Amino acid sequence: MEDATTPKDKRKKTMHDPSLYNDDLAPVPAGQRTWSTYNYAALWVGMSVCIPTYMLASGLIAGGMNWWQAVGTILLGNLIVLVPMLLNAHAGTRYGIPFPVFVRASFGVRGANVPAVLRALVACGWFGIQTWIGGQAIDSMLKILFPSWAGFDGGKWVCFAAFWALNMYVIVRGIETIKALEGIAAPFMLAVGLLLLWWVTSKAGGFGPVLSAPSKFQTFSAFFVFFVPALTGMVGFWATVALNIPDFTRYAKSQRSQMIGQALGLPAAMTLYSFIGVAVTSASAVLFGEPIWDPVQLLGKFNQPLVAFVALIALLIATLNTNVAANVVSPSNDFSNLKPSLISFRTGGLITGVLGVAIMPWKLMGDYSAYIFGWLVGYSGLLGPIAGVMIADYFLVRRAELNVEDLYRRGGIYEYQNGFNIRALVALAAGVVVALIGLIMPSLEALYRYAWFVGFFVAGAVYFCLMKQGGETWSTPKR
């Protein structure tokens, strides 16, 4: 592996092919790896404390779970997804490389564009969803501050455009702006969330009435039918970041920093904010006679403008944090990987913004069932197989050894067949087909309910077997 202290101009010469290299995709030098345990814990707090997290829990409540079943499902899902998250994070920290470069080891220097684009398109969908939600929060704030705003028919579209522009501004400022934003905003958002929880539950008569609602499932079998796809949806929620986590861990001071930071930040933040979503949604049923799973709609019903305004500001900051960190960083790198000489990180971010609008997020956001069982479970069947191939390649085939220079040049050990590792593409296709076949064959619907898990294990197993059959051609490279 190249000396991280090598000057930038010398690195450009040794990294060879300009079609595979630019400064944004290059290994991060040792001196720039400054992210600590706190930065990673704060990153996860910032990404977890957001409206879609809130909607996860409130959606499970609306679907029939009681409060502890909903929170327990989310906790279990996040503990499960933490495993591939930490496994894929290892290469980023060890070699300083982002996701689209890391995936070249398994899919080939050109074939890496296939999983990178799949991941990027899902991120564009998420970017659009988060931007739409943030725009609705701004619209609700303006209605509280200026009641006449409610009479402006195009108000929600103006707010959507304004929040989109704010996201683009942050990404143009670069990765260090994201780091600073997460570190400052994360504790503030948690504090405001807890304050909102206290205020709403006190209005509803305390936690007793709020958390006393029983589960609607009368038998274990009825609960299990709902629980399995719900758990898959919880894993699918962070299946995107489980792939591109090297985009963040390439800046880590050490493996210990990123591992402890993620292990502390992800499950704890998701569980706590999910509980807030459960409690506030349950309180809405007490206060308004029906559970309201959309917090923007809920806050719009409050008669105290100051409380609603502060809460919406907090949700707006939370959505901005999550959107930029989780949904722009990765596709920016992924699109840059398509043509590094023409597409920079910032240009990739602008492409993400445009596609996020083109996907029409206002149509993706339906009821809780469409959100959890359609969107989350559906795309998890695409991303689980990619994770299976990556982890099988890095840990089982290569034993965590990569030749970094060959990741950036043609004709090296990751060239395979004209830049494509056909074995990886076959494994990916096998995993996706098995995971999603239940959508068209009702008798195999159970496979779809486990889409991420099925795709992960099928693709990983197929890839490992095919690579082992390849013999010395696919042996672990020397560094």
Image (cartoon, rainbow, N blue to C red):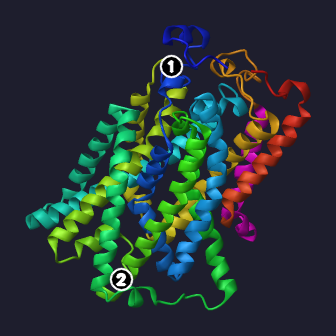
Mark positioned earlier in the residue sequence (1 or 2): 1
Measured Cα–Cα span from mark 1 to mark 2: 51 Å
- Asked whether, in this view, residue 452 is left or right of residue 62, the answer is right
Q: Hey, what amino acid is under mark 2?
A: Ala
- Of 338 and 183, nearer the camera is 183
Quarter in which the C terminus is drawn: top right
- Of 300 and 96, nearer the camera is 96
- Asked whether, in this view, residue 142 is left or right of residue 338, the answer is left
Q: Which corner quadrant of the image does residue 208 belong to?
A: bottom left
Disc assigned to residue 22? 1
Q: What range is drawn magenta here?
A: 422-448
Residue at disc 1, secondary structure? loop
- Asked whether, in this view, residue 361 is left or right of residue 116, the answer is left
* Residue 280 colored in magenta in the image: no
Quarter in which the N terminus is drawn: top right
* Residue 425 colored in magenta in the image: yes
Residue 479 vertical placement versus 213 (above, below): above
Residue pictured at 27% horizontal, 51% vertical: 160
Q: Which residue is mark 2?
A: 283
Q: Hey, what amino acid is under mark 1?
A: Asn
Residue 193 vertical placement versus 166 (above, below): below
Count residues near mark 1 (Cα–Cα under 10 Å), then give few for <14, some for 14-19, many for 20+: many
